[in-house]
Amino acid sequence: MIYIIDEDVMQQSTLQTELEIRGHKVKIIPDADSAYHVLESAGDDLELAVIDVMLAADVERPKSRFSR
């Protein structure tokens, strides 16, 4: 599985489509908190993680581990 971690989900759809055409399973994760939980339990399923450098924290969580 290839994970794309970026809050701008619409912008990543082209990359997702290209990877899926080439036979990869792709999942887009929209924030740092969700990505942490998914990647922590991904195990051997993780092939690649493409991570936005300026990734947003989950705005719904009052105390994100990734907030400033």
Image: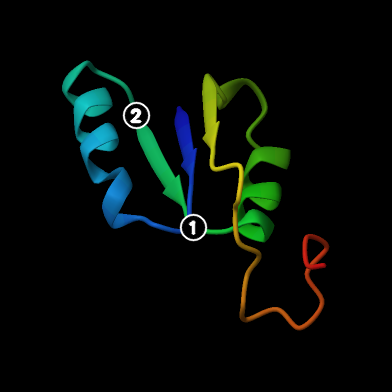
From the viewer's side, name the closer residue of 41 and 59. Answer: 59
Image quadrant holding the C terminus, namely bottom right
Dot 2: few (<14), some (14–19), or many (≥20) neighbours within 10 Å? few
Pinpoint residue 12: horizontal percent, then vertical percent. Answer: 32, 44
From the viewer's side, name the closer residue of 3 and 67. Answer: 67
- The kind of residue on which mark 2 rests is Lys
Task: Classify 10 as above or below 27.
Answer: below
Q: Name the residue under label 1.
A: 30
Q: Is 55 on the left-hand or right-hand side of 68? A: left
Q: Name the residue under label 2.
A: 25
User: In terms of image quadrants, where is residue 51?
Assistant: top right
- At mark 1, the secondary structure is loop
- The kind of residue on which mark 1 rests is Pro
Pinpoint residue 32: horizontal percent, then vertical percent. Answer: 65, 55
Task: Classify 2 as above or below 27.
Answer: above
- At mark 2, the secondary structure is loop
Dot 1: few (<14), some (14–19), or many (≥20) neighbours within 10 Å? some
Tell me the residue at 66%/64% (across/down). Answer: 57
- Cα separation, mark 1 vs mark 2, equals 17 Å
Tell me the residue at 83%/63% (across/down). Answer: 65
Pinpoint residue 25: horizontal percent, then vertical percent. Answer: 34, 29
From the viewer's side, name the closer residue of 23 and 6. Answer: 6
Q: Residue furthest left?
A: 21
